[in-house]
Image: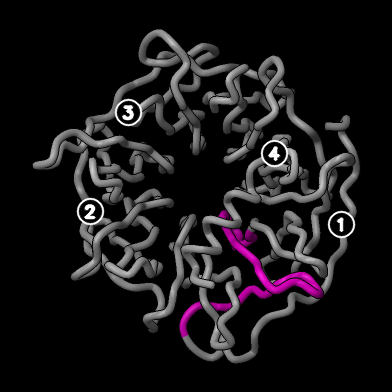
């Protein structure tokens, strides 16, 4: 199975309460592939019995959030401490699986609990001690995800409307839910993907990348659209630095993604792909403007890449095997996934 296949499968599984409950916080030694330890990224391994793991978020202390399979193939939200020790964060009662997406500097993880067979998701937060809370939803929403959390505990993500279309939302630390305003009438597909230390949120509304300020009911700020020779693109701002630099992707008319970075005034720049590649996206950004993501070749293999503050691209993996980069912290340590030498997909740490 290729990383592209696993990514598609896991994100389909990653679709997804019970009142606040206590996580079954099982700590142990991560099951890493020894053959992957000697060169390149650090293999973070899996929970006992699992074969697949994925790292999405990292805080400035080097603590990582993501998910790992357990025996039987179910997914569990996990947290790796700075030494690589893995903790099973558990799942909300009534749900079968869970995933962690991001982690703040206090160690609080934002993610989801979900039931794949009925496509039901609950936005979930795990505190420093592993206690979990189900966040409120829009009326009747079945699909809810908590994508990001900042250091004061404000969470952003998505909650579906009556038509099961994702809507951008924000939760205050006390759990109060706000549906973020759009650029116009109607309820197109929208989402809030990141929130920075100042409370500004990045995401998208319809085909446009937007920012929302920290106000109680912020109006969206439109970011410049990347216009290619083939025409305008569908833009998404996936991450936002504390210095106000958004990064993300622009989807062209052929369905290929182009990595983009906006400056603090909202002007867009297309970032380069690796030579010969056909698609790429930027998923993480540090305060100096360094970004992480992937670049994909013509046969669909994605490789983890890093762009420096000047926009120059480099590989994060010294092989041609499939990998992806996600978040990056202020030490410019990144996380993502890698293919091990035994052809497993594992969470990875990139220094």
> Is residue 240 part of the magenta span, yes or no?
no
Q: Which residue is mark 4?
A: 119
The residue under label 3 is: 208
Q: Residue at x 59, y 68 (%)?
A: 347
Q: Which residues are magenta?
A: 40-64
Q: CA distance from mark 4 to mark 2?
A: 35 Å
Q: Residue tagged by mark 2?
A: 271
Q: Position of residue 325 (x, y in %)?
A: 45, 62
The mark closer to the camera, 4 or 2, is: 4
Q: Dots 4 and 2: beta carbons under 8 Å?
A: no
Q: Is residue 239 above or below residue 200?
A: below
Q: Examine the rendered structure and indicate whether residue 122 appears above or below residue 164.
A: below
**108 up-or-down from 303: above or below:** above
How far across and how far down the image is residue 77, in percent? 73, 54
Q: Mark 2: few, some, or many residues within 10 Å (few <14, many ≥20)?
A: many
Tell me the SS state at disc 1.
loop
38 above or below 170? below
- The 10 Å Cα crowd at callout 1, few under 14, some 14 to 19, many 20 or more, is some
Q: Nearest the camera: 151 or 270?
A: 270
């Amino acid at each position: 199975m290729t990383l592209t296949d696993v990514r598609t499968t896991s994100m389909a599984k990653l679709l997804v309460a019970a009142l606040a409950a206590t996580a079954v916080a099982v700590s142990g030694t991560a099951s890493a592939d020894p053959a992957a330890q000697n060169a390149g990224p650090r293999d973070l391994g899996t929970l006992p019995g699992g074969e697949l793991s994925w790292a999405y978020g990292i805080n400035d202390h080097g603590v990582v959030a993501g998910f790992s399979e357990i025996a039987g193939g179910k997914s569990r939200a996990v947290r790796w401490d700075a030494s690589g020790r893995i903790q099973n964060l558990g799942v909300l009662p009534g749900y079968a699986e869970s995933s962690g997406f991001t982690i703040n500097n206090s160690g609080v993880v934002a993610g989801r609990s979900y039931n794949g067979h009925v496509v039901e998701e609950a936005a979930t937060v795990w505190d420093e001690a592993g206690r979990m809370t189900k966040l409120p939803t829009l009326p009747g929403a079945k699909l809810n995800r908590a994508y990001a959390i900042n250091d004061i505990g404000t969470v952003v993500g998505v909650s579906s409307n009556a038509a099961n279309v994702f809507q951008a939302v924000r939760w205050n630390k006390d759990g109060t839910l706000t549906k973020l305003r759009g650029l116009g009438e109607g309820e197109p597909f929208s989402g809030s993907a990141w929130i920075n230390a100042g409370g500004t949120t990045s995401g998208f509304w319809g085909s446009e990348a937007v920012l929302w300020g920290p106000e109680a009911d912020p109006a969206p700020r439109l970011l410049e659209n990347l216009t290619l020779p083939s025409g305008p693109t569908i833009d998404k701002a996936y991450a936002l630095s504390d210095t106000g630099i958004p990064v993300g992707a622009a989807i062209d008319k052929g369905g290929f993604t182009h990595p983009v970075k906006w400056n603090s005034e909202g002007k867009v720049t297309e970032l380069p792909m690796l030579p010969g590649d056909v698609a790429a996206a930027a998923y993480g950004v540090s305060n100096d403007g360094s970004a992480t993501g992937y670049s994909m070749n013509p046969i669909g293999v994605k490789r983890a890449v890093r762009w420096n503050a000047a926009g120059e691209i480099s590989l994060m993996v010294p092989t041609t095997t499939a990998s992806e980069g996600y978040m990056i912290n202020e030490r410019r340590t990144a996380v993502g996934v890698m293919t091990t030498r035994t052809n497993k997909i594992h969470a990875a740490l990139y220094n």
